[in-house]
Image: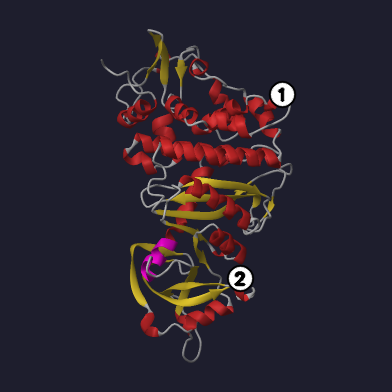
Amino acid sequence: MKLSHRPAAVSSAFDDPNLVSAAGLVPAMGLAWSTGLGALVDEHLHLPDYFGANAGLKVSALVAGMLAGAGCIDDMGILRHGGMDRLFKGTYAPSTLGSFLRQFTFGHVRQLDAAARRWLVKLAAAAPITAGIDELALVDIDDTIKATYGYQKQGAGYGYSGVKGLNALIGTVTTNATAPVIAGARLRKGAANSARGAAKFVADLLAAVARLRSPDAGGMVLLRADSAYYAHSVAAAAARAGARVSLTVRMDPAVKKAIAAIPAHAWEKIKYTNAIFDEESGKWVSDAEVAETVFTAFTSKKKAERITGRLVVRRIPELNPKAGEGQPTLFETHRFHAFFTTVKPAVLDTVAADKTHRAHAVIEQVHSDLKNGALGSLPSGKFNANAAWLGAAVMAFNLSRAAGTLAGTKFAKATTATIRDKLINIASRVASSARRIVLHLPSNWPWKTPWEKLFDTIYPPPKTT
């Protein structure tokens, strides 16, 4: 593409008070307020003093800024340009929103979480972001390290990854028909062990999932996690909530003994639909074998507290066998990946259980999505301010998922960045006609149809008589 004018014939001026750069915020925030975001925050969040006033408006402003691409407090200035004040109430200055976040204590963060959980239920009723959850709810938990820099960030430390930062524990819920939504999140110190507080988090997460399901829902709830969460407290919390578990196990002596006892004829060949890159060998793997055996987990506990289930094992030929004399042993010819599950074989057979467990990796996409947007930074030096920022980021993520679902087509499972670029950040001129606000958007916008579908859902056109 080439400039159509000579440089001397081009000039610019920031002088139009009726332009906005994010017209998609109109239907998106209309959806947020119609589902009670502001009212629920006002009801549950009680911050003291001047900066605690209008909490619902301020949290909504944070969510709106994040939808438009704000990755830090200064970026919230995007709410105060052009004709934004004609479209929205509560376009606060970044300094005001920063002061608001710094008022949070741990208790206030929990209040914000309570509002977020209740709002997610209303959001799911307005947009089918959890369609099919009564038949099957796949709940995933995992933590991620958000890198931080400098010496004034409360709680920052070196965790298991060796990266200095803060630890965000995320819980998502997915169905067979929908992409993940975030049902819970908690910020922890950077040096926190992955399983720290996981049992309480799982209990809260599954309670939030129960609110999203019908009272008479009979389908399975399955909690999936990696080996960092293979702990009795986590499995017991899931069992108390009526959920099944699918937890990657560590290769301890008991697990190795159980794998060695699996007979040769029990192994069943599987072929991956798409080859998987094996990091240890540096090669692509396209086939493997699976088998299972009865397994009792957590045998160090009392007999009444032990949990019996299935140990499902996937083995891959060792592409770099160890050199040595004599006949190689079992664990030299194959590499094993095992997980413990309490799902009955009649519900998921061996191959299906393995495939379902491997789909736990979807939560990594959620981590990446958050870090590519609102969680691009944890902007405050105060730990609880960053915890509140994470709470607002979760709301923005779920709102973008709902907006994309209402827009239809490919946006139902699109990333936040795609929804932001094609449905939210659209330039528009604000005009008034017959006491109605009219948004004049670019002609020939490639994604006009899904945008209009979203807009008409929130603001239905007048009915003809």
* Region rendered in magenta: 348-357
Which residue is at the far top?
Answer: 434
Quadrant in the rendering for residue 232: bottom right
Which amino acid, by three-letter code, is at mark 2? Glu
Taking 177 as reference, is 392 left or right?
A: right
Q: In percent of the image, x 43 and y 62: which residue is there?
A: 358
Q: Quadrant of the N terminus?
A: top left
Identity of the residue drawn at 73% across and 26% down: 49
Is the residue marked by circle 2 packed among few (<14), some (14-19), or many (20+) residues within 10 Å? few
Say if 221 sits above or below 450 in the image: below
For disc 1, the marked residue is 50
Residue occupying the far left of the picture: 465
SS label for mark 1: helix
- What percent of the width, then of the height, locates residue 454? 36, 30
Task: Tell me whether circle 2 and circle 1 mark residues in contact (CB < 8 Å).
Answer: no
According to the picture, the residue beneath numbered tag 2 turns out to be 305
Asked if residue 68 is positioned above or below residue 161 in the image, the reply reads above
Q: Locate the C terminus and report the quarter of the image it occupies.
A: top left
Residue 259 on the magenta segment = no
Q: Main secondary structure of the magenta part?
A: helix
Residue 360 percent location from the top left of the image: 46, 58
Viewer-nearest residue: 200 or 407: 200
Q: In front: 174, or 152? A: 174
**Where is residue 160 shown, x and y percent of the image?**
63, 59
Instruction: Report whether residue 265 is seen.
Output: yes
Instruction: Give the image quarter of residue 276.
Output: bottom left
Q: Is residue 102 above or below residue 196?
A: above
Of the residues shown, which amino acid type is indicated by label 1? Tyr
The residue lying at 31 percent from left, 21 percent from top is: 443
Residue 109: mark in rendering: none
